[in-house]
Amino acid sequence: MKLGVVILAAGQGSRMKSAIPKVLHPIAGKPMLAHVIETARKLNPDNIVVVYGHGGELVREQMASADVEWALQEQQLGTGHAVEQAMPLLGSVDRILVLYADVPLIRHETLLRLIESSADTNLGMLTVELDNPTGYGRIVRDEEGAVSQIVEQKDASAAEFAIHEVNVGIMLINRERLATWIERLDDNNAQGEFYLTDIISMAVKQGAVISTVSPDDLFEVAGVNDRVQLAELERELQSVGAQELMRNGVTVIDPARIDIRGNASVSQDVTLDVNVILEGDVELGEGVRVGANSILRNCKVAAGTVIKEMCVIEDAIIGESCQIGPFARIRPGTELAPGCHIGNFVEIKNAQVARDSKVNHLSYVGDATVGESVNIGAGTITCNYDGAYKHRTVIGDHVFVGSDTQLVAPVTVESGATIGAGSTITADVKENALALSRTKQRSVMNWKRPQKDKG
């Protein structure tokens, strides 16, 4: 049967206290709405419709690449009204799955169980038992245990208020039945809204069987209404990610202090120290060690490399058995061959550094090609920008660059050359040559150092 998915994303989210629409607030580096769309897509639906309202144009702009259809709910008149706006866009689907953009951690495995359990029914829904069900609609069952209705908390009697099984809003509904049920919804309730949950009592009166499924973890169906709940779900998701890494042979020094904000492919025997952030597409080879407070973003790090504390690596490729840091910044376009050493307070940008080369201290290497077994001394700068254009520095194999050297690009230093400390190199240096650009040192005897007046 053809499946359509409706994602409700029109709520104002006033408790977020934000000019940003609630559904765009991020968890693990992605908007909540993006999480729900990705989960829905794993179900291979025929189409996905997002119902938007508050801040709608910004939502559509930020999610332009999501490849979904959009339905506008100009007035927020309840969940039933929201689903009604999506119906014309659902084509010829047989069943409609209703999801919520502010319930971002629902697993597709749970939704598959809901779909399977509802194969022979007109309506399926997710329910959970909560110790504190405050704020949720209560599931009312008959004497035989079948669902008879859902009562919203503000409309509940004392007996209904005491029920702990609650509706989380996620439903799978036969499309033809839903169309007739939505037409009969009214707003005769405490909120003055058209509740989608009112279709339950309609279904019961028609003798429809209602199937129910519960998720494995409560956080799957937890909604976000404020920033406190947003932070709680962030930690839940990060905990799940850390546990998965550890089960796959990764050492996570403190699972409560790690953030995975994207797709991390981490091999066995990798060690991640506290406050490491893996963002975007990150690939770590066997035995890689990442020091505390380091950020790795869209990068590949080969086996055996050690990244020391306080490093930032972004859009870069790092070869095997390199050493980086502490306090190093590896910027986009950088490629380090095996065995490179990049030391403390070094910045590398758009540079290719060949095997066994070293840039150990307080240097900037940008827009450069560096050969094998090169030693670049402390305080070296490739002067790549002339105020209008970027230029490239080329350094051959086995070059020794003395400390406090400025290489004014475009410039080439051929293999085997040596550059004396304190030099400013503005012309090419030939193979095996020594280049110096110092003024002659002189001494002034009996020099009197200036002193402040004692008055």
Image: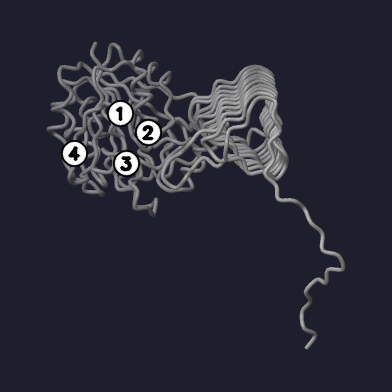
SS state under label 4: strand
Residue farthest to the right, as pictured: 446
Q: Nearer the viewer, mark 1 or mark 3?
A: 1
Q: Tell me the number on the disc at residue 66.
A: 1
The residue that label 3 is drawn on is 152
Q: Considering only vertical position in the picture, is 345 above or below 90?
A: below
Front-lying residue, 342 or 293: 342
Q: Tell me the number on the disc at residue 168.
A: 2
Whether the residues at callouts 2 and 1 have beta carbons within 8 Å, the answer is: no
Quadrant including the C terminus: bottom right
Residue at 28%, 35% in the rendered image? 8
The residue that label 4 is drawn on is 72
Tell me which numbered mark, 2 or 3, is placed earlier along the sequence. 3
Please indicate, yes or no, whether residue 237 appears anywhere in the rendered image.
no
Whether the residues at callouts 4 and 2 have beta carbons within 8 Å, the answer is: no
Front-lying residue, 319 or 171: 319
Q: Amino acid at mark 2?
A: Val
Q: Is residue 329 left or right of residue 5?
A: right
Front-lying residue, 285 or 352: 352
x, y percent for residue 389: 42, 41
